[in-house]
Amino acid sequence: MTAVPAERMPVLVVLLLVQGAAGLLGAAVAVILALALTAGPAALPAVAGAVLPLLLAAGLGRGWRWARPATLAFELLLLAGYGLSRLLGLLPGIDAETGLVPLLANCALPAAVMGLLLSPAREQPV
């Protein structure tokens, strides 16, 4: 895999930080509910899912080799999860999240990050 072009790096890092901030907000709610319901470690996946975009943003910013494929895998999982959620929402009795916020957080942001990572670098005119 080729390195991420330098002009795209700030945008990628900011998009991953936005994903991390949204994840941290959701994780905070999950932790509060887990503590209120004495569910204990039930909120651990939410916290891990919130910290991962922040770690990926740091890895991309520092040029770590594993960060690009890990970011692509993470974003692909988010898109697949959103698609599966929408498909399951078609079944009777299963309520899927609908609205603009889940669409942006689970579909548009991952698609933008993947687009920036996968699109070829432009040649600079001399």
Image (cartoon, rainbow, N blue to C red):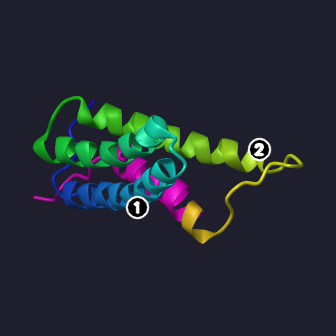
119 or 75: nearer the viewer:
75
Q: Amino acid at mark 2?
A: Leu
Give the residue displayed 38% in from the left and 45% down from the top: 47
Give the residue displayed 39% in from the left and 38% down from the top: 72
Residue 79, given in percent of the width and then of the height, sits at 55, 45
96 or 7: nearer the viewer:
96
**Magenta segment main secondary structure:** helix
Q: Quadrant of the C terminus?
A: bottom left
When the figure is inspected, residue 75 is found, relative to residue 2, above or below; the finding is below
Q: Residues within 10 Å of mark 2 (few under 14, many from 20)?
A: some
Q: Quadrant of the N terminus?
A: top left
Horizontal side, residue 10 vs residue 19: left or right: left
Give the residue displayed 40% in from the left and 57% down from the top: 28
When the figure is inspected, residue 56 is found, relative to residue 28, above or below; the finding is above
Region of the chain picked out in magenta, as a range: 103-126
The residue indicated by pointer 1 is 25
Q: Amino acid at mark 1?
A: Leu
Residue 113, given in percent of the width and then of the height, sits at 38, 52
Residue 96, given in percent of the width and then of the height, sits at 72, 54
Indicate which disc residue 50 carries: none
Q: How many marks?
A: 2
The residue indicated by pointer 2 is 88
Would you say residue 65 sits in the magenta stretch?
A: no
Q: Secondary structure at mark 1?
A: helix
When the figure is inspected, residue 67 is found, relative to residue 27, above or below; the finding is above
Q: Earlier in the sequence, mark 2 or mark 1?
A: 1
